[in-house]
Image: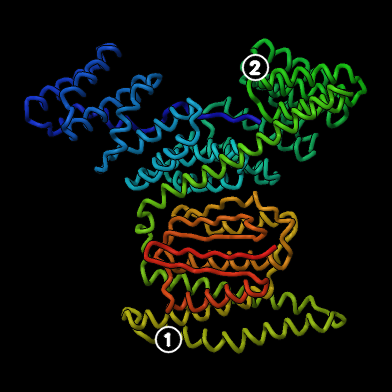
Amino acid sequence: MMKWYSPFLIFALLLWSCKNSTKPNYNTTKNGIVVADLIDKGNDIKLSAKERFAAFDKADTFAKGNTVLENLVANNRLYVVISAFPDSMAKATPAFKKIEADTSDNPYKAYYQSAMASYFMQQQQVDSAFQLYIKAKDQAILHNDSLNAGYCLIRTAELWQTYNDYHQSESDAIAALKLLKHQKNNEYLAEVYNILGISYTFLKDFPKAITAYNKAASFATTDLQKQILKNNIGSVYAMNGNFDKAISVFKGLLASKVIMVDQSSKARVLDNLGYALFKKDFGGLDEMQYALKIRESLNEKNEIASSALHLHDYYYHHGDVSLAMVYARRALVEATAVNATDDRLTAMKYIAELSFGAEEKNISARHRQLTDSIGEVRIRMTNNFAEDKYNYQLATDYAATMKKNAALEVKNKMIILYCGIGAIVLVVIFFLYKTKKEKQLSTYKTETRIAKRIHDELANDVFYTMSFAEKEDLSSSENRETLLNNLDNIYYRTRDISRDLNTIDTGVEFPERLRELMSGFHGIHTNVIAIGLDAVQWEKVSTAKKIATYRVIQEWLTNMKKHSNAGMVVLNYKIQKNKLVVTYSDDGVGLASESIAAKKMIPDTENRIKEVNGKYTFETSEKGLKVSLSIPL
C-alpha cells in the first residue's frame, strides 16, 4: 500500500513576505542600530547563503545580553533558513532554542515548531518531532490557525501508524478533518483521507477504507495521486478476497498514461495485479516477474523485497521449493538492507519453513529475537508518545478555553435526557414485542421491572422539570441551578436503568472495547490517553472483574465529560503484585465531596469494586482529579 506525503514545508510563511515593509521598533542604542543593519543584510536575497549567515552570526555578537535583540535575530535567522535554505536546518537549531525559551506571544512560533519537527523527522529523532508537532498544534489553535494545526495532526496521525496504533491515528486524523473542513486545502484533505484509508484497512474495516480512499481521490491535486489512491482501493478489494474487483481496478490502472510513465507506480500495479491473479487462480507469474525487473532497474530495495515475497508464495504453492527458497532469501537480503522489519520477519518465517536442521534453528532463533525486539520497541515508543502528549498538555491551561454558556448546557442536557429516555423506551418496546409467551419468566420480570422504573422514577420528574422550564424565569441563576440539579438527578437514574440492558464483550476483544469506550470521550478539546493497556494480560482477569473495570472507567469518563472540564485524561493500566491496577487522572476542576456528581459517583464506584473484592482511592484538588482501583487477580 502506497503512502504519499506533502513537500517538506507547506505552510503560510509567506505572511512574512511583507516583513521589510514594517520595520520593528529596534533598540535605539548603537548596538540596536548595528543589529538592525545586519538583520537587513541577512534578509538580502541577493547575497549568498554564506554571506547571509555570516551577517546573522555577527548580529548575534552585537545582540548578546539584550533579550529583545537576541530574539529578533533568532526569528529572522530561522525564517531565512526555513524559507530559503531548508537543507540547512541544522544551522537553525540554536535560533530555535531561543524562540522556544521566549515566553512572549509569538504568532509564528507554531510555524517554526512544525518546521523543526519535520527536520527532526528527517534526522530520525521521532520523539522530538512528536513533541514539537503537539506544541505546534496547540500554538496554532491558540492563534486561530486551523490550517497549521490540521497539518500537525496529519503528521502525528502518520507517526501513530508507524507504531501500529491505528485507533489513535484515526482519532488524530478525524481531529485534523474538523480543523480543515472549512480551509478548502485539497492537498491536506486528500492526505487526511488517505491516512484514514490506511488505518481502516489495517483495522479490517474495508468498506470504510474504500470510502476514505474515494474521498481522498476527490481531493487529490494530481492525476498520479488519483491513480495511486485507485491502486490502494484495488489492494483493499484484494485483502478482502474480492479478487475480481481488484483485478479490474489494476488492469484499468495499467491503461493509464500516468501510471505507465511513472515506472515505480507501474511496477507496483503490476505486482499487485500478478498477486491478485495468483490468489484467484494461481497465475500472475509474468506480471510479478516484470514488476521485479522494473524495481531492480530502479534499485528499489524495499519494493524488491515485496516482489520477492510474492514470488516465493507463487513458487511455494506450485511445489518448486528450490525457487521459493531463492526468493525468500532474496527478500531477506533486500529487507535487511533497508531495515524493513515486517518484510524481514516474513522472509525469516518462510526460510525457516523451507530449511532443515541447524539452518532452521538459526533462522527460527533470529526470527524470535527480531519479533521480541520489534514488539518491545513499538510498545515503548507508543507509551513514550502518549506520555509526551500528556506531559506537555498537562502543563498548559488548555482546559480554561472550554467554558460553556449556561443556557447551552441546559439545552444540551435536555437533548441528552430526551434521547436517553427515548432510547430506553425503544429498547424496552423492542424486547417486549420480541418476547414470546414461552420465554423464561426471568426475562419478562426484567422487562417489567425496567418499564416500571421508567414510569415510577422518571415520568413524573420529567413532567415536573418540563413544566418548571416553561413556567419559571431561567434568566435567574437560582432557577437555572434548580433546573440543572433536577436534570442531573434524572440523568443519573436514566443512566442506571440503561446499564441494565448493556452487554460487554469480555473475550479477546475486551482491550478493543476499552479503546472504543475511551475514544468516545476523545475530541478536539479533550485528549483521552491509555498507557499500558496492551501490556496487561487480560486473559488472567475474570469476566466479573473485567465488567467491573469497564463500568468503573465508564463512570469516571462520564463524570469527566459532565463536570470536570478536563483537557487531558490519562488512564494507566498495569499488573502489580498480582493485582490489576487502573489509575485515572485529569487536569479538570476537581470534584468537591459535597457535589451531586461526587455523591453519586463515589458510592457507585465503591460498590462495584467491593463486589470483586477490590479497593478504591480518591484524590481531588483544584488541579484535577486522581482515582484508582486495585483488583486482585
Instruction: Specify whether 200 is left or right of 111.
Output: right
Q: Residue furthest left?
A: 29
What kind of element bears circle 2? loop
Q: Is residue 83 visible?
A: no
Residue at position x 38%, y 60% from top? 402
How many angstroms separate mark 2 from mark 1 (CA)? Answer: 72 Å
Q: Where is residue 306 in the image (x, y as percent from the top left)?
A: 72, 24
Looking at the figure, which quarter contains the C terminus? bottom right
Q: Position of residue 295 (x, y in %)?
A: 68, 15
Q: Position of residue 584 (x, y in %)?
A: 52, 61
Q: Which residue lies furthest to the front in this view?
A: 577
Residue at position x 80%, y 21% from top? 311
Q: In which quarter of the image is residue 77?
A: top left
Q: Residue furthest right?
A: 319
* Image position of 330 with respect to 179: above or below: above
Viewer-proximal residue, 334 or 418? 334
Q: Report the amino acid beneath label 2.
A: Glu
Viewer-proximal residue, 405 or 119? 119
Instruction: Specify whether 94 is left or right of 173.
Output: left
Task: Tell me the number on the disc at residue 300.
Answer: 2
Q: Where is residue 115 in the image (x, y as percent from the top left)?
A: 39, 31
User: Which mark's residue is nearer the viewer, 2 or 1?
Assistant: 2
What kind of element bears circle 1? helix
Task: Tell me the number on the disc at residue 468.
Answer: 1
* Image position of 1 with respect to 551: above or below: above
Q: Report the amino acid beneath label 1.
A: Phe
* Mark 2 residue crowding within 10 angstroms, few (<14) / some (14–19) / many (20+): some
